[in-house]
Amino acid sequence: MSGTRGTRVLVLNSGSSSVKYQLLDMGGGGRLALGLVERIGEQSSRLKHTPLATGGEAREWTGPIADHDAALKAVAEELARDGLGLDSPELAAIGHRVVHGGQTFTEPTVIDEAVLAEIERLIPVAPLHNPANLTGIRTARALRPDLPQVAVFDTAFHTTMPESAARYAIDVEIADAHRIRRYGFHGTSHAYVSRATAKLLGKDPSEANVIVLHLGNGASASAVRGGKCVDTSMGLTPLEGLVMGTRSGDMDPAVIFHLMRVGKMSTDEIDTLLNKKSGLIGLCGDNDMREIRRRIDEGDERAQLAFDIYIHRLKKYIGAYCAVLGRVDAIAFTAGVGENAAPVREAAVAGLEQLGLLLDAELNAVRGDEPRLISPANSRVAVAVVPTDEELEIATQTYALVGEESN
Ligand SMILES: Nc1ncnc2c1ncn2[C@@H]1O[C@H](COP(=O)(O)OP(=O)(O)O)[C@@H](O)[C@H]1O
Ligand SMILES: CC(=O)OP(=O)(O)O
Ligand SMILES: [Mg+2]
């Protein structure tokens, strides 16, 4: 069976309300198709599918897509229209992004019932993500029960964090009994981007110290020393750290007791408040950085305040990780905001000359899909924009594992 397997890998990156996907030929054919389903669960769900293999035009439609199961079936239909359907014998495996792997999963893992049960057990510590990941896996398994399905965990890259960074300063027995520690997320992106940044500097990853700022809807920073993560901003769950689209990031935990005792809010209400109604959307009503910048240009003070709080937090993490690493070779901006929002990069680095960080305004304004430097030659620390590619990284890890297993 394995000898007849093809070389294609379908990657599914299921977010809380979206699915990003890519079909790649790992035998040298590159990307065959990619796309995105967003606003799942709303009336105006949107699917955008780009059939790269056939050189066809991107197809786009909007309409209600109820859940991740329906989203994946819609994706399968689009792929089938291009002759790239999930029934293809050329498909070697399906790779899934899984956000929380706890301490159990430190490597890409072929999914079986026991793996599914563990991902399900971890739902309380990734409430926005693991349920969507599970639905994606179950639907994909139903469509192709014969194919290996591989989970690639966001948490895996962060398992090298020393105990001094991974532990909270709480009672050790209680922490261990409940497996409370800092796991970190977006690890596939931090791994890919830190390596790509080293390459941009002409260094081997084992020689480069890099701060990666992954700024998407969820956002996290990591300190990577010689290719290994030594600290990251997310913790037990993807709620800690930076200000995000809808999540608060760092806060005095006593805010929660106060909301319970004085605000009379329930645990679930507070959970929803901090995960879905905080961050940029809580501060100004918008979580899309494009919209926030547009409002700032019109003089909107709430949008300006949200932006300032977002930048203040980001700066604190840059400073902290300079201290953690001691020597920093580069800072890399990535993900939707990091790759596209020049004003965010400019504001985050402004005033950090003492830390060796300079920005070239003209380079910062250039748009592009390739990794690029945005600092002048005399900047002691290089500042870079390095587009992430979680799907490619997941495909690479999936194919390596499936190839290994079939030998
Ligand atoms: N041109 C742009 N300028 C500013 N922000 C942008 C731009 N394009 C995308 N973004 C931001 O990127 C975010 C999505 O980033 P992405 O990495 O795709 O997030 P996720 O994977 O978490 O859904 C959007 O919410 C938006 O704020
Ligand atoms: C872990 C996490 O926050 O992921 P995302 O940015 O996709 O929401
Ligand atoms: Mg993302």
Image: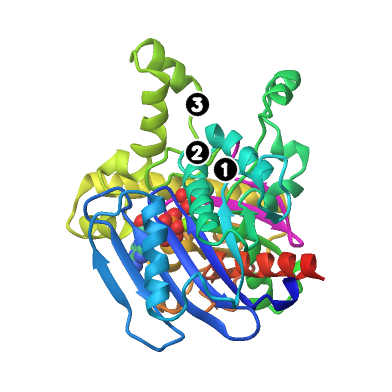
- Outermost residue to the right: 407
Give the Cα distance between marks 1 and 2: 6 Å
Q: Which residue is denoted by mark 1 in the rendering?
A: 234
User: In the rendered structure, which amino acid carries the disc numbered 1?
Assistant: Met
Give the Cα distance between marks 2 and 3: 13 Å
Q: Which residue is denoted by mark 3 in the rendering?
A: 252
Residue 289, above or below 323: below
Residue at image coords 66%, 44%: 115
Residue 81 left/right relative to 328:
left
Residue 42 left/right relative to 124:
left
Q: Which residues are magenta?
A: 215-236
226 in magenta: yes
Residue at image coords 53%, 32%: 124
Residue 42 left/right relative to 377:
left
Q: Nearer the observer, disc 3 or disc 1?
A: 1
Is any part of residue 218 visible from this angle?
no
Image location (x, y in percent) of residue 4: 70, 77
Residue 344 left/right relative to 9:
left
- Quarter of the figure that contains the N terminus: bottom right
N-terminal-most mark, 3 or 1: 1
Residue at image coords 40%, 81%: 82
N-terminal-most mark, 1 or 2: 1
Q: Which residue is denoted by mark 2 in the rendering?
A: 239
